[in-house]
Amino acid sequence: MAIKSQILADFMDDFSPSLVPEVEKELLLKTGTSSEVWTLFTDGALNVRGSEIGIVQKPPTDGIIRQSIKTTRFTNNEAEYEAMIAGLELAKGLRAKVVEARCDSHLVVNQVNGSFKVQEDRMQRYLDKIQVTLQRFKEWTLIHILQE
């Protein structure tokens, strides 16, 4: 089964081109650089209405970028991985160099940080995708947060 991230890649192509110049201008005006820490919050969910992923980006300047995406049907873990991948891709598309990601999925955080082993091929493909994406950043951290 292929990773279902293509819809997120398509979203990124449509979403980021008009947003990048504005965000970058704001960053340069307020900080003189775009290499400060971007904070990323992600969440994925599965319910009776389908799957959704939520992304909140906080640039080093004031302001917040929020995005909610209704997706094809995922498991809860797949939705959490999809949200993280989409958030990281969005951050990179906005030219973030340093990202601090915060996620409420104990599984995703611990698999990415190497504390948990991956037991399913599908989850391994998600983990591989995230690891490749994280290599595109100068620095990154992934922190587990409480669901509340």
Image (tube, rainbow, N blue to C red):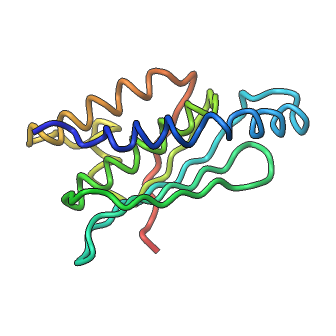
Query: In what quadrant of the picture does the N terminus appear?
Result: top left
- Choose between 96 and 22: the one closer to the eye: 22
Q: Which residue: 29% across, 36% down?
A: 114
Locate residue 98: give its quadrant: top right
Q: Position of residue 91 (x, y in %)?
A: 57, 37
- Choose between 112 and 23: the one closer to the eye: 23
Locate residue 75: give its quadrant: bottom left
Q: Position of residue 110 (x, y in %)?
A: 30, 46
Relative to residue 113, is residue 142 drawn left or right?
right
Q: Which residue: 75% across, 39% down?
A: 23
Q: Which residue: 83% across, 34% down?
A: 25
Figure check: 37 above or below 70: above
- Choose between 22 and 45: the one closer to the eye: 22
Relative to residue 11, is residue 70 drawn left or right?
left
Figure check: 97 above or below 61: above
How many numbered marks does the figure carry? 0
Q: Residue furthest bottom?
A: 48
Q: Position of residue 14 (x, y in %)?
A: 52, 40
Q: Which residue: 64% across, 28% down?
A: 95
Relative to residue 77, is residue 69 drawn left or right?
right
